[in-house]
Image: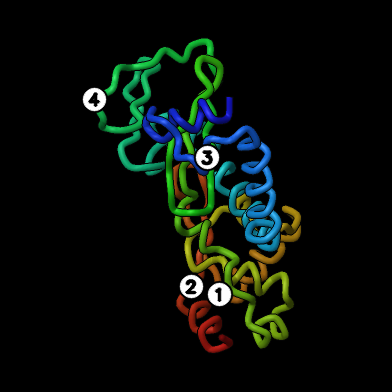
Amino acid sequence: QARADLAVTLGGGPLPAALDRDDLADRAADAVAWVWTHTVLPDWPRRRRVLEADVVARTAHLGRGGWAEALNGMRPGIRWLGESRLQINAYDNPPRELGRAELLFVPVTPNQCWVGWDIPRRYALVYPCSGALTDAGRGPVPTALGALLGAARAAVLVLLASPLSTTQLVALTGQGLGSVGRHLRVLRDAGLVRRRRAGRSVLYVRTEAGDVLVRSAS
């Protein structure tokens, strides 16, 4: 089955000799395990927070504006056409009926997108997390800023180079909702952070004073 699936992925022709082997599935599993252990696992806590923040944001968009808003900007070419119709690209392919199948939306941290399927049971649309979330948390909190504000509060301030909601901050920092709320209140009182409404959401972002403080401590 592994060889048959790979042949379809490669265009339907015969497999190269190096891949046409009985132990292909086992060797592929070993390769995936190596990639996970050596390239993904060391950075997994940050990646997981980014993925969770994206899911939170998409869910909020869905509740606020329906599928059209939730899918906006997910990947090039994707559009909600209405009447339960979803366009995933501009290719001239025949439509597929997914009424009895699972449709999964899978965020990833690399800036790549693709589709996957296990016909007729399951389909997946893989899309990159938004740029602001993917970059969030990559750099360490400056030592001087952590000493001044405390490490947890400084981490919140560093993340707010781009507007984020409280729920997104919880997912990205791993801190509790109450802790994030207290940090935001202190930062707002100090004039380092401001908040604004975006539809039904409340977003927080650094003020000019906050930007100056982060830059000077870096």
Q: What element carries label 2?
A: loop
Q: Mark 3 points at which residue?
A: 19
Frontmost of labels 3 and 4 is 3
Work out how far the residue at label 3 is from the one at label 1, CA to CA, in angstroms. 57 Å
Q: Is mark 3 on a helix, strand or loop?
A: loop
Badge 4 crowding class, 10 Å Cα cut-off, few under 14, some 14 to 19, many 20 or more, is few
Badge 2 crowding class, 10 Å Cα cut-off, few under 14, some 14 to 19, many 20 or more, is some
Q: Mark 2 points at which residue?
A: 207
Work out how far the residue at label 4 is from the one at label 2, CA to CA, in angstroms. 47 Å
Q: In which quarter of the image is the N terminus?
A: top right
Q: Which mark is residue 92?
A: 4
As drawn, 202 above or below 64: below
Frontmost of labels 2 and 3 is 3
Please, what is the three-letter code of the amino acid marked with disc 2? Thr
Please say if the residues under marks 4 and 2 sit with CB atoms less than 8 Å apart.
no
Work out how far the residue at label 2 is from the one at label 3, CA to CA, in angstroms. 55 Å
Q: Would you identify the image quadrant in which residue 14 lies?
A: top left
Please, what is the three-letter code of the amino acid marked with disc 1? Leu
Q: Name the residue under label 1.
A: 192
Q: If you read the primary sequence from the N terminus, does the residue marked by circle 3 or circle 1 appear first?
A: 3
